[in-house]
């Protein structure tokens, strides 16, 4: 009994450790004082100010567009690659998996620098599209690693059965394979989206001077002090995701409940 | 050119599928991987060779080992060793914190495992620079911890702008990457194996040492890599929590690139990559050994 309470206490402590900075940032978004160090009373001022701040809204727009596009393109390339890799023989598959692991295991700073060097060598102007391509590059492995396990669980005979029954390979893919691997594809997409949203280092090296994502915008403000509007924006983003996740979780729980009773 | 490639392979393979379904099945989908292969070649393999090229050449493009040997410069050497020391410390702390946590979480009877995963990765939706900046608030001389300590008339803690603050930042940022792989391995362990060990008279300590720990080793290994590599190479955490005096190897490389010294920066990156590869080689050796044990 004591052990169980100790265990819960430990989990609680770690969760506090993980969420304490987030609580502080949320508190700061309501802080009337512009300084990070002083509490000047409650205000919603920064939330109103946020929507008038063009620089921040532009950075938000760039961040979201890059996250969405890179996750989408990475999901398409990654899913098709995973399907192809799954049907390969062992040795080529191992080589492909090894290459897939490089951007995941390598340091962000090395990936960022190497991409910057190739863009510059090709005289490609650093800007929106170079950041987008960099994000696609580090997102693809997350998609492949999410889709692969689902493909392994797949019954290969269902696809053959569909073909025997006269379905074209493309039709059979959409009717038989895709529904089975869809949870993996979806979680790969969300993982890629999250990684793109949170990335700083690779963006830092592959972006040009005219464009900023939220991360790089925050980094330029580290020394001179963060604008409180940024706290307001990240609070809004965090709360949005939190609510979304709670809704999804509840829906899933409801879906599962009747099965259990039966 | 990429499109041409795909369509030409398709044209060759499709007639084959009419004759022999089984034989062509594996070949037919192979073209699906071509966009990926091209992408990875262009954005992963060739860029890595670019680093090697820049690292081993001077401004005029001639071969030199000078950039690599710059690591022996006292400032750079110190930055590398400090980065190694801090990243090893934070990896060890992450492991000590994460293993019991993963073990406890794996015993929770949750409706879905995804809920636990969500709780661990949810903080990532708050920008990681901001979360690290928030630690300044907690650790500062007049920060939350010290206000709390002063209230109880306890001695204050001054760790902001010290290596300890950087270690804390590393542990905070990379702890999820240690918890999740270990947790994922632990929940997959077959309960029957544990029950069998109990039935055969093993006490809980023996069950842990002989069954759970060896089986969870792959998760521990991948957790260690996922914490060690980003800690070793970070320049953001040291910038935010270390003040301007503490310089890690990541800061040195970032600075070289900011100043336009690409050859020097690439040379130092190559040294860093050697350390990353070395750590992976050591870890994969352990991983293989554990697999060998599993078979026996």
Image (cartoon, grey):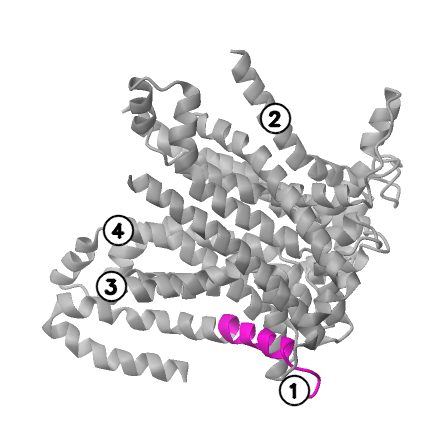
Question: What is the distance, in whole Å, between disc 3 and disc 2 at their CAs?
Answer: 49 Å
Discs 4, 2: same chain: yes
Give, as a single range, the part of the protein colored magenta.
B43-62
- Tags 2 and 1 on a common chain: no
What chain is tagged by disc 2?
Answer: A
Residue A208 on the magenta segment:
no
Residue at 79%, 37% in the rendered image: B138
Q: Which residue is mark 2?
A: A12
Secondary structure at numbered mark 3: helix
Of mark 3 and mark 4, the one earlier in the sequence is 4
Q: State the mark number for residue A171.
A: 3
Number of residues whose C-alpha sits closer than 10 Å to that of mark 2, classed few (under 14), some (14–19) or many (20 or more): few
Residue highlighted by disc 1: B61
Any part of residue B155 in sight: yes
Q: Nearer the viewer, mark 3 or mark 2?
A: 2
Q: Are marks 3 and 2 in contact (CB under 8 Å)?
A: no
Distance Cα–Cα, label 3 vs label 4? 17 Å
């Amino acid at each position: 009994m004591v052990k169980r309470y100790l265990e819960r206490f430990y989990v609680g402590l770690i969760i506090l450790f993980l969420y304490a900075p987030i609580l502080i940032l949320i508190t700061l978004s309501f802080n009337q004082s512009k300084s990070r160090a002083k509490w000047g009373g409650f205000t919603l001022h920064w939330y109103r100010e946020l929507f008038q701040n063009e620089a921040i809204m532009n950075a938000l727009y760039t961040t979201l567009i890059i996250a969405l596009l890179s996750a989408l393109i990475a999901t398409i390339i990654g899913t098709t690659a995973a399907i192809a890799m799954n049907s390969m023989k062992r040795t080529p598959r191992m080589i492909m998996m090894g290459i897939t692991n490089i951007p995941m295991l390598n340091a962000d700073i090395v990936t960022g620098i190497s991409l910057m060097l190739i863009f510059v060598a090709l005289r490609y102007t650093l800007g929106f599209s170079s950041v987008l391509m960099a994000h696609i590059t580090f997102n693809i492995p997350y998609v492949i690693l999410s889709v692969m396990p689902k493909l392994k669980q797949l019954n290969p005979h269902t696809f053959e059965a569909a073909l025997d029954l006269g379905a074209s390979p493309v039709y059979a893919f959409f009717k038989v394979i895709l529904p089975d691997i869809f949870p993996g594809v979806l979680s790969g997409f969300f993982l890629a989206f999250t990684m793109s949203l949170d990335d700083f280092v690779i963006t830092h090296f592959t972006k040009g001077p005219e464009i900023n994502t939220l991360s790089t915008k925050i980094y330029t403000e580290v020394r001179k002090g963060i604008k409180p509007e940024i706290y307001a924006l990240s609070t809004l983003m965090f709360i949005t995701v939190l609510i979304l996740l709670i809704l999804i979780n509840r829906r899933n729980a409801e879906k599962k409940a009747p099965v259990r009773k039966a | 050119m990429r499109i041409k490639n795909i369509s030409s392979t398709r044209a060759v393979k499709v007639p084959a599928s009419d004759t022999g379904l089984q034989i062509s099945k594996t070949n037919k989908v192979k073209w699906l991987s071509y966009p990926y292969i091209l992408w990875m070649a262009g954005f992963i393999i060739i860029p890595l060779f670019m680093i090697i090229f820049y690292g081993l050449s001077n401004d005029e493009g001639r071969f030199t080992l000078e950039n690599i040997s710059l690591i022996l410069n006292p400032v750079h050497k110190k930055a590398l060793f400090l980065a190694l020391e801090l990243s090893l410390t934070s990896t060890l702390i992450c492991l000590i914190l994460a293993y019991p946590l993963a073990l406890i979480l794996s015993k929770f009877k949750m409706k879905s495992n995804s809920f636990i995963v969500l709780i661990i990765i949810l903080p990532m939706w708050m920008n990681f620079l901001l979360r690290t900046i928030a630690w300044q608030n907690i650790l500062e001389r007049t920060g939350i911890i010290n206000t709390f300590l002063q209230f109880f008339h306890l001695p204050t803690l001054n760790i902001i702008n010290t290596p300890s603050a950087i270690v804390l930042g590393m542990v905070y940022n990379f702890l999820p990457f240690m918890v999740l792989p270990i947790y994922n391995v632990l929940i997959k362990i077959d309960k029957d194996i544990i029950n069998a060990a109990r039935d055969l008279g093993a006490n809980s300590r023996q069950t842990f040492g002989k069954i759970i720990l060896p089986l969870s080793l792959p998760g521990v290994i991948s957790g260690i890599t996922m914490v060690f590599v980003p800690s070793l190479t970070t320049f953001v955490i040291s910038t935010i929590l270390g003040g301007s005096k503490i310089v890690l190897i990541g800061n040195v490389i970032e600075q070289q690139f900011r100043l336009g010294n690409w050859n020097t920066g690439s040379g130092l990156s190559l040294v860093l990559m050697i350390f990353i590869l070395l750590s992976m080689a050591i870890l994969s050796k352990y991983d293989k050994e554990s697999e060998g044990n599993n078979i026996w």
